[in-house]
Image: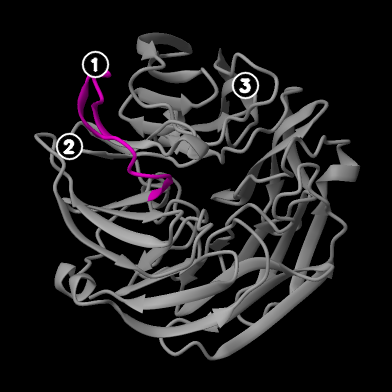
Amino acid sequence: MSLVAAFPVHGRLAAEDWPQFLGPHRNGSTTNAIDIKSLSDGPQKAWSRKVGHGFGGPVIADGHLILHHREGDNEVVESWDLVNGTPQWRHAYPTHYEDDFGFDDGPRASPAVSDGQVLTFGAEGRLTSLRLEDGKENWHVDTLSRFKSDKGFFGLASSPLVVRDLVLVNIGGPGAGVGAFKLSTGDVAWKLTDDEAGYASPVMSGSGSDALALFFTRAGLVAVQPGTGTLVLTHPWRSRQRASVNAASPLVSGTQIFLTASYGTGAVLLSRTGNQMSEVWSGDSALSAHYATPVLVDGHLYGFHGRTESKPAFRCVEWATGRVAWSVDGFGAGTVVSTGKLLVTLLESGELAVLEASQKAPHELARTQVLGTGTRSPFALADGYLAARDPRQLVVLKVR
């Protein structure tokens, strides 16, 4: 179910925008076309910029390309013109985040755009609302100090989800494991659970009175009525070891919900009947995602199986049964987007690879180098452009 279909956002969002994490439908799918020949010949670079630290990906809305990154001791939100890269505005605020494991010290979450606002969530848990027009601050909430959140292993990383007049995030504090803030003011609308945050971002399931906000916390699935903050159900699903994360967001198809995690956890397909959940299938041998959310095309999942340091496989898995239709071993880690019958993958090597979304056999159609190594951030595909970043630069390619 599309976020826009289930909960209309205010303001103008073009049909081909990529206004939030995982795109217009919050599931990694889009109707935006991509020209295979242009990739085979080497994609045309529209523009590029040197950028700071961070794992959050760019978003595209109303002609703006927006990125949240870190330069020096500041987290920075910047907006450029999508077509020509002209700077539009820049907003910075101080950060003191230090990664305990020596990894990147920038923000981990992608922004969200709704109702003329840009919502960001920093590595230290600062939730900020800026005006899309000029980057002026509307409000901010320091969730780390206010809710006594734990910064976790690698900082906070929940990409905001806008549902009507609310902003939903995984907070990760006592009594505030998950929560919602008023879009207009930043005031707390509701907060629930003691769950640690993990690294997944919330999504929506269903519509109307049956709609649920789904949070994949460190402990498992938490389903909440977004308007009232009523806890509807939970389903434990977490790693068998302490040093672990739940990082891939839930995927929804009808009344079924798919969860996947690495670290010996594996995948599970859940079926919801009223306020009850039952397991359809589960196991660690089908599709155990380290950090990238898979995509669903024609009843089959496509995604990365295995931890990034072990050079994961890229797989096609039957949604209904968990049966592996095919697997390309040693494909490498990365992120994936579906557009029609195509799968667009951006690998940590900086390569862009396009495959046919076929359940019969893997068929790679194009591959080209577009960025440097260490590319982990999700990319955006909108209006004939693909925007992606590595640890050093942001690049915008013409792909249609």
Q: Residue at x 37, y 32 (%)?
A: 252
Q: Is residue 62 magenta?
A: no
Judging depth in this view, the residue of 283 and 225 nearest the camera is 283
Residue 51 in the image: x percent, y percent? 62, 74
Distance from Cα at disc 3 to Cα at disc 2? 31 Å
Q: At label 1, which amino acid type do we have?
A: Thr
Q: Which residues are magenta?
A: 315-335
Q: Secondary structure at mark 2?
A: loop
Q: Position of residue 238 (x, y in %)?
A: 58, 18
* Residue 184: quarter of image: bottom right
Q: Mark 3 sits on what residue? A: 231
Q: How is the image coloured?
A: one colour
Please state, as top left, top right, bottom left or bottom right, where the N terminus lies in the image. Answer: top left
**N-term-proximal mark, 3 vs 2:** 3
Which residue sits at x=55%, y=39%?
202
Q: Nearer the viewer, residue 368 or 296?
A: 368
Residue under numbered circle 2:
298
Which secondary structure, mark 3?
strand
